[in-house]
Image: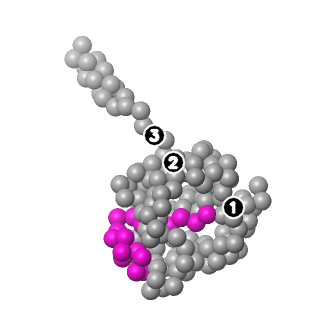
Amino acid sequence: MGLSLIVYFISQRDTGKKEPLATVGLPAPNLEVADAVTSRKLSLADLKGKVLFINFWATWCQPCREEMPSIEGLFKRFTDNKDFVMLTILFRDDPQAGINYLKQNRFNFPLMLDKEGQTAKAYGLTGVPETYIIDKKGILREKIIGPYQWDSPEALELISRLLKE
């Protein structure tokens, strides 16, 4: 009897509804971020019908800093395509440090803030850098943990293919 009561209480302990984490092949979790410069807020619904490139990073993260030039290359390649949106989200870092870092390095891609950390939590962020690519239908198509060469032929082909869908 005692063991069955323990099993019952353990099984009942975590019955709260959990939001699904970002899973490739499933709809992307919502995001709520604000532009670091203009404070303009964005959610996933605002970006419907766009291919999204979402990269979490920090100025204190050396691998993040190493991949930044390739992110700038990707941004420049698709900056004129109205169906492509790049969101780089500063994670556990000072917003002014992020703004200064981009200015010092002449990076032009948008810097977003996740003030309460809700977007990082919704996506199940494990660390930085971490990148998510979402198609026009809102389906998560790629999840890359760690640095990547975003201006490589493979990355450019992936984005081009998703833009054509």
Mark 3 vs mark 2: in front: 2
Instruction: Please tell me in which quadrant of the rendered image residue 12 appears.
Output: top left
Magenta-highlighted residues: 85-101
Give the residue drawn at x 37%, y 58%: 115
Amino acid type indicated by mark 1? Asp
Residue 128 visible to an observer of this rendering: no
Say what secondary structure mark 2 lies in: loop
Say what secondary structure mark 1 lies in: loop
**Cα–Cα gap, marks 1 and 2:** 19 Å
Amino acid type indicated by mark 2? Asn
Which of the two residues, 111 or 7, is positioned nearer the viewer here? 111
Return the residue at label 3. Answer: 19
Return the residue at label 2. Answer: 30
**Cα–Cα gap, marks 3 and 1:** 27 Å
Q: Earlier in the sequence, mark 3 or mark 2?
A: 3
Residue 85 picture location, percent across and down: 61, 63
Instruction: Please tell me in which quadrant of the rendered image residue 159 appears.
Output: bottom right
Residue 119 visible to an observer of this rendering: yes
Query: What colour scheme has been applied to the protein in the rendered image?
Result: one colour
Amino acid type indicated by mark 3? Glu
Give the residue drawn at x 66%, y 69%: 155
